[in-house]
Every structure is written in C-alpha cells, then in structure tokens.
Image (cartoon, helix red, strand yellow):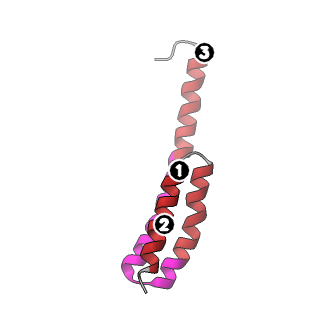
Amino acid sequence: MANTRSAKKMVRKIARRTEVNKARRSRVRTFVRKVEEAIAAGDKSAAQEALRSAQPELMRAVTKGVMHKNTSARKVSRLSARVKAMG
C-alpha cells in the first residue's frame, strides 16, 4: 500500500487514467470489430465505410497514448488489405 501523500495521489491518478484508457481501447476494438464483421458478411461497401470510420479512431488512440503508432498502422494496413481483397 502507498505510504506517502504523493504515492497515494499517484495511485488515484493511475486508477483514473486506467479507466479512461480502458474506454478508449474498447472503443477502438468496437470500430475494428465492425470492419471485421462487414468483411465476414461479404459486404464490401459496408466494410469500406467501417474502415473509413475506424482509421481516425485508431490514430486517435495513438495520440492519446493508448496504442503504439506502428501497432495502429499495422492494424489499418491489414484491415485495408482485407477490404481491398474482397473485390
């Protein structure tokens, strides 16, 4: 358990930040899942639309520090390749 005042404050801060990051990560996963569901359904136009809305979310996760830049770029790249291959 935290002893000093500063350590107790850090525990509170970390808990708050963890909650925010959890929500952000969950939001990103939801957008990615929508793209994957559209791909699985075979609906190319819906998949393209879902990908267009997922890309900014993935990049936003990077700027907020939830995800590494390369991780986000890799996810976008793989999803777009799968959408492109649907043709």
The disc at residue 80 is none
Q: What element carries label 3?
A: helix
How far across and down, in percent of the image, does residue 83 sit? 45, 77
Q: Main secondary structure of the magenta part?
A: helix
Q: Give the magenta-colored segment's residue range.
A: 22-48
Name the residue carrying label 3: 5
Q: Residue at x 58, y 60 (%)?
A: 57
How far across and down, in percent of the image, does residue 39 sit? 41, 77
Reply above or below: 16 against 48.
above
Q: Is mark 1 on a helix, strand or loop?
A: helix
- Between 47 and 68, the residue placed more toward the observer is 68
Reply above or below: 17 against 70.
above
Mark 2 is on which residue type? Ser
CA gap, disc 2 and disc 1:
23 Å
Q: Which of marks 3 and 1 is nearer the N terminus?
A: 3
Q: Which residue is drawn at 45% across and 69% down?
A: 79
Q: Which of marks 2 and 1 is nearer the N terminus?
A: 1
How far across and down, in percent of the image, does residue 48 sit? 52, 78
Q: How crowded is mark 3: few (under 14 residues within 10 Å), some or many (20 or more)?
A: few
Q: Which of marks 3 and 2 is nearer the N terminus?
A: 3
Magenta residue check for 32: yes
Q: Is mark 2 on a helix, strand or loop?
A: helix
Mark 3 is on which residue type? Arg
Instruction: Check contact, mark 3 vs mark 1: CB within 8 A.
Output: no
The disc at residue 77 is 2
Name the residue carrying label 1: 23
Quarter of the image with the C terminus is bottom left
